[in-house]
Amino acid sequence: MSVGRGAGAGVSRIMPAALLATALISAVSGCGRDDAGTSAVLSLTETLGGADTVGYARAVDPRPFTFPLDHGPHPDFRNEWWYVTGNLADSSGRNVGFQLTLFRSSLAPAAPETKSAWATNQAWMGHFAVTDEQGGRFRSFQRFARGAVGLAGAEPDPLNVWVEDWSLRGDGPGVPWPLRLRAADGEVALDLVLDPGKPAVLQGDGGLSRKGPEPGNASYYYSFTRMPTRGQVVLEADTLQVVGASWLDREWSTSALPQGVDGWDWFALQLDNGWELMVYALRRADGSAHPLSDGVLVDPSGGRHPLAYGTDIVVLPTDTWTSPLDGSLYPSGWTVTLPGRRWSLEVQPVLENQELDLAFRYWEGAVAVSGTDGDRALGGRGYVELTGYAGSRPER
Amino acid sequence: MKLLRRASLRYHARHPAQLALSVLGVALGVAVVVAIDLAIQSSREAFKISAETVAGRATHTVVGGVGGLDDGLIRRLRLEVGVRAAAPVVEGVASSPTLPGMALRILGVDPFSEGPFRPFVVGGAAGLDVSSFITTSGGVVLSAPTAEEAGTALGDTLPLLVDGRMWRLPVVGLLEPSERLDRVGLRDLLLMDVSSAQEVLGRQGRLSRIDLRIPEDLQGGVLEESVRAALPAGARLEPAGTRTAALGGMIAAFDLNLTALSLLALVFGMFLIYNAMTFSVVQRRELLGSLRALGVTRREVVQGILAEAFAIGIMGAFGGVLLGVVLGRGLVRMVTRTINDLYFVVSVEGLSVPVDVLAKGAVLGLGATMLASLAPALEAASAPPRVAQIRSAVEDSARRAVPRAALAGGVLCSVGALLLAVPARSVGLSFAGLLPVMLGMALLTPLGTVGLVGLARPVLARGAGILGTMASRGVVTAMSRTAPAVAALVVAVSVTVGLGVMIQSFRSTLSRWLGGTLQADVYVSLPSVQASRAEGTLDPAVLASLTGHPEVDGWSTYRGVELDLPEGRFRLVALALDPRGEASFDFQSGGGSDAFLSFREEGAVLVSEPFAYRRGLEVGDSVTLPVARGGGRFPVAGIFYDYGSDQGVVMMSRRTFDHAFDDEGVTSLGLFLKAGSDPEAVVRELTARAPPGQTLVVRTNAALREGSLEVFDRTFQVTAVLRFLAFVVAFVGVLSALMALQLERARELGVLRANGLTPGQVWKLVTTQTGLMGVVAGILAAPMGLVLAAVMIYVVNKRSFGWTLRMEVGPSVILEALILATVGATLAGLYPAWRMSRTSPAQALRGE
């Protein structure tokens, strides 16, 4: 399969998109749990069935992005998300990682025609996770809601994206900057202010990120890779004043996963030298990397530098971690080398167990980076996402 | 002992009819008790399961007042108060032409909120296609067996009638009930998305309730308080199950009345046993005497007789339980139909037959048999160990017992009267008072019999000569046999008469009330599954079109809503009254022009008699309602008679209603026509004004009245059936008693035959005697029936349902009692008469 240059950049977040519609369908089932949240467990393969694309808008050609409008929703497309991860620390050096993801999914091309305010074709899911590095605790939560009667939704101006009381709002003077991110569940809460930092990085071909060779199987995709972040984190009895950096991925599409992909390892690293590195390997059944696996570097001024996976950048796992849920085996710890730049990085999870046991199971967690740029030290922080491992019992 | 047992077996083998009747008596009594119990239990269980199915695992529920809750409240609770598990529910009732006779419950839910609540919404391997569930307008999910019954399938449509509007709803999913509970609970359920449910029920923007899960810990307590604080006026938070319990409680009085009636059948059964056992003992006195002479002890005799009773009881109870299950199948439909008409929607798939109900019935039957046999057993033991005892001695003592029985009867009656006079509201107490009154009157019957027969003797002597005298004397001289038979007949007839008078009084009270209440010429409403609890509203355009008819001179509008308050459910009605409509109120207290002025202008309400009775309200008190605006306290300006609902009605003027609530609906319409108009013609024209797809129920005054009486008759079907069954048991008892009596006289008649009495004269003698007993019983039953009716009407009914009924007794009642008793007794005398007349004197005297 020949894939154009940059075609793959940004497949990374495809997983939730493909999952979402199906996840919503099954995830509402209680699975016999007695907690107040909704939960269900899906196997990844179950969710990969091709969803219908008829009636939806599709990403065929590159388009100009208009901000702040494009920060808002694109309901003609089947899937869309606002995906924020970040590493924060308080003045005493206590580290906190967080993930807040708001997924939108159209259940049908159009809403049913009734006068009821509940009538909608928009479904929403939220994932929220907090990693307390020193406390050694990882917590994750999810929400489902329909995009009606104010339970969940997105508005472009002023920017407001919410799933119940988890929200991303942009009503600041910088339209929409700074963004205000708020999420809470039980004894964990975030209230953060995010500045853009660098300009938006348009992924793929000027923001058109191809997912496969057929036209339309692509998404519109942009990222803010280093957003200065400040605010407050509540961890049970502790309220921390924190600062740090966040990463926002924005993507909307009516697209499907590439054939034959079982899962992927995705890295978003913010390095101390002002660069950001995104790299992902799409794993096939035999363990090899799919040709759409790719990487990209963002320089301190926001310039984009594509990396060819396997040659410009090499990722090798160094260790494994066994999920206590069912013995599924995950990679845990990697070496990432960029031979052309003489960068050699060690990526280590700040906690081994950052697995989200939600509507679908995956590992998404804060990582610490240490290594060298030639002979200079090069460190950093980041987030790693690992999918397709749940249920993979080690046979050997 | 062995000897005794053999003697006993031999005796019963020689009297199979006697034995069969005894067993039948127990069986019928047990059957009626079991059948009613099963019917009630089944409908209660079905209601409970379906309520639990719908309630799911909610711990609390937010309910609104009039019109339910606003859509926006769910957002407030989930986003602002922070209740994680809060699910919107829109409920309604519908029917489908493909499922005749079944009231379907629409349950509108939001699948994304359902996880913690109702597993069947989202669970199951097949899973629900949430996408099409949410995005198919009007999409409906129902249980697979029900879909099959309706002849529809996934992808097809289900025709659904809601408030007279016909929909064809796409079936977007089927629920496969995995266990019995699910099958029962899901049977009549139509699951829809909350948006579709609002659309179909015409309730855009409103929720029936919001289900919550609040943990039972300290935090939960805090959350509960925050929820309360966030609720708008008129809404309230209550623990889950409150409403179900309240609804279940609504039918408590109804249940109790049916159960009491069913126990009556058992009491008659006891009479029968008593008769049969007494007779068998009396007949075996000689035998028992011989046995005693042979060394059988008193104790052994008692044990022997009780063992016989036990065997009869076992056979009867077994047969009764079987018969009860069969009977229950028929009764359960009537019982649920009545519950549907009067209280709430419940659909019973089949009779559930819990073993404990059967066991209870069997034990009750057995216990009653043993109890009824105790006296005969003791009497048997008293037989002295002599070869023979002079029969006349028995009758002497029986005659001496007459005044003592009457005295005891008088005492019992007084005790019962005292109990009834206790100013409590307990329905159970009124039945507890009724029982001694009935027993007391039964004990008074021997005295009455002696008196009446004494009066009849000269008449009979003149009419039938020596035979007449013999017949009348025979009644009194064989008191030990005749008295129980007459008493049984009297009680049976009086119960029949009493219930008849009660139903008739009720019906005529209702009829008169309808005549006064229905003042308009033509009534318009929407068809409804629930006879008297319609909530669907007329479209304003339709309303305008109807009132715009050239023959219409004026109109009243009526808005009825069912309100569920912690203290019970009742109907709130908003009336925009044409002045002519004021005459439709018949006030128990209050009323008058002042009352109407404050009703119209000053926010006063008029409450129905049951409502006032249940809450102990009087004119001048006030009623508190969960209003959307204002204080919510409404002074009572009048208490009016109303027989439409035993839960009560509160009426306010439309103006008062609009001030307090956000609800513009009109449930029904009463139209006054211009003088000289033809109501039938107007009805036809108005019916034609209904928009396409909408059915209106347009009826003339007379038709509505008839329709209401039809519902009444339907609700009293069960009572009528019980009345009939009780009479059948009593009749069997009388038959057995009279038969025994006449058969026992075989020897006496043999002597008479030998002295020249012809078979025809035997016929005459026997039928005259039983006929006389019938007439006597009829005469005694009439006043007793009236007393019974009075107690049922003024005490039981009032306490059970809060209604004041006017007792109506026509001369026909007395006549009916006489005919019933005479015909019953004569019929019961036919077989013995036939047998006696056929027996040759030689055979009858062979024993000499």
Image: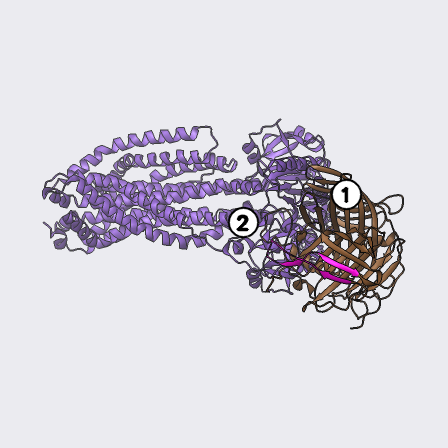
Which residue is more in the foreground, B462 or B582?
Answer: B582
Chain letter for the part of the structure drawn in purple? B
Color encoding of the figure: by chain
Occupied quadrant, residue B368: top left
The residue beneath circle 1 is A89
- Which chain does tag 2 point to? B
Q: Where is residue B150 in the image (x, y as percent from the top left)?
A: 58, 62
Residue B197 placement, left or right of A307 = left
The residue beneath circle 2 is B710
- Which chain does tag 1 point to? A
Residue B419 placement, left or right of B124 = left
Labels 2, 1: front one: 1
Which residue is more in the foreground, B163 or A209?
Answer: A209
Tell me the colour chain A is drawn in.
Answer: brown
Q: Does the magenta stretch include residue A264?
A: no
- Amino acid type at circle 2 is Glu
Q: Where is residue A135 in the image (x, y as percent from the top left)?
A: 68, 43
Tally of numbered discs: 2
- Residue A248 shows up from this direction: yes
Span shown in magenta: A314-337
Q: Residue furthest top?
A: B620
* Residue drawn at x 19%, y 52% as measured from the top left: B9
